[in-house]
Amino acid sequence: MITKNLKFIVPGVLLLAVAAWIFWPAKNAKVPTPTKTTKVEQINQLPLEKRPYVTMYTRTDGKEINLTVDKVTDATSMEYELEYYDEDRTFIEGAFGTVDFSKESLPVTKQLLLGTCSKNVCRYHDFVSGGSATLRFDGGSAAYVLKTDFNLQLQGDKEGVFGSKDAKVTLEVGRTGLPQTTYVMIASTMGLPDAIPAGTTVLSGPYAFLSASSPTLKQATITFKGVTEPAAKILFWDGKSWKELKTTVADNEASASATALGTFVLVK
């Protein structure tokens, strides 16, 4: 009887096996891993004339950065992130914090130590040569992010020739133009300290060359590179207003004499 029914049993078993293989999930089947999405920040999208004015300089020994933010008009809070490295980029360190503009009046200045302190003992990072500052503003009509790279250069090392990270602007003060131990920070100011003169348009900058002191410069030259506009002019912010410098444009460069460290912008 069993032999007689094999012709019916075997096909049935085979059919069930095929169905199980098709419809039953495999024991070792890999479950697809959800794809992680990374939020991409839109940086420096706010129009120049609406951005806060940001300056940075170190104290005299180069161990601490003073970050000053002013002209904030459409935000109630700010998160700041400073990253820095040495000349060989062998380390990256950072300083972070937040600002509540309802509790701190403008301009707001933060002292960011280039090192760490514990129990009144500080260990500083030597040979810091540059980095970046990222500022995230919120609480206004729309959140926005601003970022700038910076160089930190020593007069004695650079022999009086200081340059921006993007190589678009240089300031030459000469080998004896500043004390050899003077640290100069070079960075975009993200925004303007005040509106530029009516009828002019920003071509490059603004850039700030700042130190702990504000010495008078003799025979110093500020130069913007990659300039194709023959009528370009360099403006200098003297702390109260923009001053037009006598500008020479030649060989795709715009140059002018500079009498002090500060903020410069190229306009037409």
Image: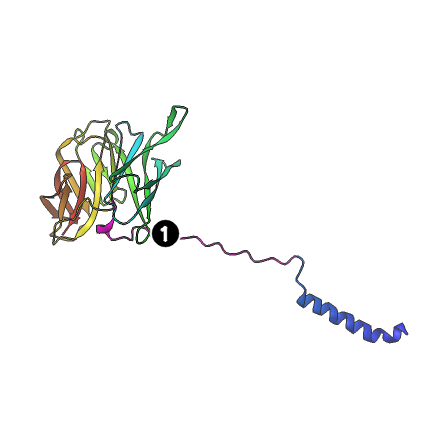
Work out which residue is located at the far left of the displayed protein and give it: 246
In the rendered image, residue 224, in percent from the top left (x then y), is placed at: 18, 45
Other-residue count near label 1 (Cα within 10 Å), few / some / many at <14 / 14–19 / ≥20: few
Main secondary structure of the magenta stretch: loop
Amino acid type, mark 1: Glu
Q: Residue at x 80, y 72 (%)?
A: 10
Which sits in the foreground, 254 or 54?
54
Work out which residue is located at the far front of the displayed protein and give it: 102
In the drawing, does residue 166 fall left or right of residue 33? left
Q: Residue at x 37, y 38 (%)?
A: 96
In the rendered image, residue 124, in percent from the top left (x then y), is placed at: 36, 28
Which sits in the foreground, 188 or 78?
78
In the rendered image, residue 173, in percent from the top left (x then y), is placed at: 17, 34
The picture quadrant where one finds residue 241 is: top left
Please, is residue 201 above or below residue 153 in the view? below
Please, is residue 245 above or below residue 175 in the view? below
For the N terminus, give its image quadrant: bottom right
Please, is residue 175 above or below residue 192 in the view? above
Q: Which stretch did the figure color magenta?
A: 28-54
Residue hosting label 1: 41
Per the image, label 1 sits on a secondary structure element best described as loop
Residue 226 seen in the current view = no
The picture quadrant where one finds residue 69 is: top left
State the count of labels: 1
